[in-house]
Image (cartoon, coloured by chain):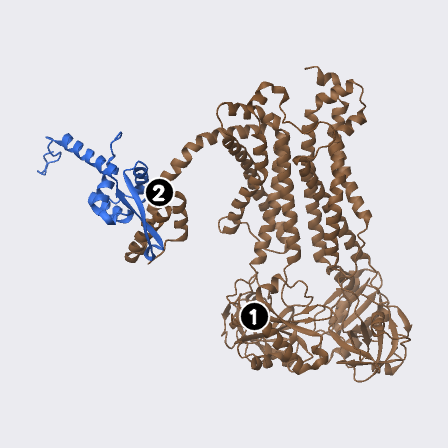
Chain colours: A blue, B brown
Amino acid sequence: MKELLTRTDELLLLTIYRLKEDAYTVPILEHLEEVSSRKNWTLAGIYIPLLKLEKNGIVESYLGEPTSQRGGRSKRYYKITNKGLRALQEVKELQKTMWDGIPDMIYSDEGDL
Amino acid sequence: MKNLPKSAELILRIVLPGKVSSTAVGDYEELYSSLHSKNRTRALLWLLGQIIKSVIPYTISNFYWRFTMLRNDLKIALRNILKRKLFSIINITGLTAGITCCLLIFLYIQDELKFDRFNSNYDILYRIVRENIESGDRDPRVPAVMLPNLKVDFPEIDSFSIMTPRAGTVSYRGNIFNEDNILLADDSFFKIFDFNLLNGDPETALTGPARVVLTESTARKYFGDSDPTGEIIKYDNRIDLTVSGILEDPPVHSHLDFDLLVSFATLENINSTALNRWTWQGAYIYFILPENIDTGSIERRLDALILKHRGDEYASRVRHHIQHFPDIYLNSSDMQVDIARHGNGDYIFGFSAVAIMVLAIACFNYMNLSTAKSSLRAGEVGLKKVFGARRKNLVKQFIFESFLFVAVSVIISLGVIILVLPSFNSFTGKMIILDLFYNLHLSLGIAGGMVIVTLLAGCYPAFYLTKFKPVDVLRSRSSVTLKTKSAGGIRIGFRQVLVLLQFTISIGLITGTSLVSRQLDLFRNKQLGFDKENMIVIENPYNSGMETRFHRFKSEIEQNASILGVSAAFNIPPHHINNWCALSTDGDDDRITTGLVYVDQYFLDLLDVDIIEGRNFSEIVSSDTTNVVILNRSAIDALNIDSPIGKFINGVWCFDGPSEIIGVADDMNYFSLHSDVPPMVFCVQSYVNKNNIVIKTDQGDMSEILGYLETKWKETAPEWPFKYYFIDQKFDSLYQSEIKMGKIVELFTFLVIFIAYLGLFGLASFIVDRKTKEVGVRKVLGASVSKLVTLLSGEFIFLIVISSLIAWPVTYYAIKLWLSNFAFQVDADISLFIMSSMIALLITIITVGYRSLRAALSNPADVLKHE
């Protein structure tokens, strides 16, 4: 693994992992909006990193059956490859090491920053 | 389930990466529709936000990096445009002219196609048209009595509307108005057509007799601002009409145009028998046809209906058709009598072809000039290739350069169009506006046209110029030419083919222009068989007093020395003949269709029509007012009568009994020279109203004579307006369409020649420039000036000869096609063609010869001293 995953990649991959069989772009977007409590995600902002990840072999995609609900267009489902899993694991371990022993940055006590 | 707006889908498809675009659009649609079901506005805002967010990165990634290279290309292109001014001016002028022509034609066609579209029944409306089997003439007028029969025989058709046009006077409180545009229509008129009734009940406004609906402008003319509903106006001084509604003026794009709508039942008061006579053919019947009905079977049943009511004799001569509503405006220009306005479909096709030719010639110029100056770009191409530019990049660069030319020309064209549009509109009688924002088709057309023209003009030069091998180019800067096939003789390369085409088009158009002007001269100068000069026609309105009015007026004005004669007749030339009858000689069953004109005894004499046999009508012979006739030469020929004088003829639908032929008149052109002289019969039956007064005057002061006539008319008939025309002027107006066409063809020819020879001039300049040294050397070695000029311009003269050979047959075919519109045609003889080629040759010699001669006359010392 030459390059580490970016934060966006990481979020995307974790979302895909959680969604399992249902991992296509719409639920991915909804999940991201939900957990990050931010509304400024765009679909286009998901396709581009996903395309890159797919090109690097981190995820793979396959087409679902076309449904009438989407105007007869099929969904593209994403799945994490073994290489992708290894990369995620690497990031996770790195995170753990880096955060070890560092306290939370913001205390819940009032006014005492 | 809510679909994405089409425009949004289109943008998304463009900006999203190709691999995922289809599924991605599905994603957008899914999210959009779920949002849409909750809140429409939020969904739209969301979509807008999403699109903006995805367009920005797309634009940056796509254009930013390309732009850097583009900026370089732009700089080089601009330098080239500015450096070679002659080349740039020739190209931009040519392209501008070509694009302007094409855009104007585009706007014109677009406007023509807009006709009648405001009607929601556009696609399902039809009308009845009858065709004369023998002559092929189509006539949309049918008997009014057909309508009740149709309603019974065609139960599957639910809506019929019948109408007939009228002209006459309308008076209100002592004011008399001439109205030429009155339409009588029945109460289903508003059900079938979408004319906008502002005031009044569409169901009943035209029900029953003596009701009238006014258009807004007519109402204002009569009543000012006060509400006219319920007021009474008088039609032709005898029929009271009650105003039952106000109508918005008919749209500009309506083939039906009228100022007053009178209820159809009023026809009974105007002409008591018109509603139930099968021989009164003056009504137009429109109807809505349910979509899946076979039109052929309807037509056969119409024929059967006519057969049932009019018998074999008549039915064997006509065939009925139903004409689709859109065709009425676009495709009826052959119908000589019609209430509908007609477009000019035949000419549009021709003009579009010529406009495209103008543009093509401009493109040829671009190709020729770009490749002719190839040596000037070779260094740049070679060097770029050395530095790693691939041919693809270079081709892109040159095509971009062509695009710049086209874009500049388009911008100038739009400016030119804004300037010429007012005169274009007054010439074509249209109200076209140039509106790039709301006229989506135009904007798309321009964009598409730009791409096509760029590729057409730019591809060949782009590939030609990028062919150079860097080694060849850079080894020796002085010998940069592509290998040409042979030095001596005349070679036919691509460039020569283009010049050949330009010459061919030029010669063809010169021929066409001279032919059109010859034909127009024929129209003006042809002997019509009667005297049309100094003839004034005054309309004598129909009513019971018309005959006494005529005699009173006649005896008044005959005392004036300037009035040489007065006569009355039913149809005055130029007029379509309204009455037709079937004539046969006694004891013969063969009948011929003959035009019937009611005249008085003085008419033929007044118009100076030759009586070639027998005698003219006489006022002394009292029996001349009944059952004697004069036939014209065509009728005698058609009936095949030897020594006709004293023979009897029978007429169906015209005379009471056999009529004696007392004379034969020479053929006269009653109507335009488009059609031949039909067989005609003149008779003086006194009971028939002759509603036109013909007055022959001397060549004195016309305005004085008109003033005199008007005063006398006002004295004799104060209740009727003074309406007159000159026969010769009215004849000239029959050729308006040809005169206009002639002007357009002239303009096109001028443009084509201008552009083509501008290009030729540029080309000759480049060739001569390149051969300066050759000319110098030859001159030193003793070549004469004339030899040198021949050497430099010989190729073009050879090309003129070849293109003449191509242009002649093609033009001959086109000319024959156009001339077939007219019964009287000019000769398209060989002199016409030779003359056109000579003109083309002359202009070529002037254009090319000038450059060649200057080169040939130059001092060899000047051109050779730098070597």
Q: Which amino acid type is shown beneath numbered disc 2?
A: Ser
Q: Secondary structure at mark 1?
A: strand
Residue that extends furthest to the bottom in the rendered view of this protein: B657
In the rendered image, the vertical position of residue B264 relative to residue B8, given as above or below: below
If the image is split into quadrants, where does the N terminus of chain B sit?
A: bottom left
**Residue B219, above or below B620:** above
Residue closer to the observer: B705 or B834: B834
Q: Chain of mark 2?
A: B
Residue B173 shows up from this direction: no
Of the numbered discs in the image, which one, if any, rests on residue B54?
2
- Amino acid marked by disc 1: Leu
How many numbered discs?
A: 2
Q: Which label was assigned to residue B745?
A: none
Q: Give the number of the mark in front: 1 or 2.
A: 2
Image coords of residue B380 (percent x, y): 55, 25
Q: Residues within 10 Å of mark 2 (few under 14, many from 20)?
A: some
Residue B170, quarter of the rendered image: bottom right
**Distance between the Cα atoms at labels 1 and 2?**
57 Å
**Subunit bearing disc 1:** B
What residue would you read off at disc 1?
Answer: B214
Looking at the picture, how far across and down is residue B710, in whole percent? 75, 67
Earlier residue among tags 1 and 2? 2
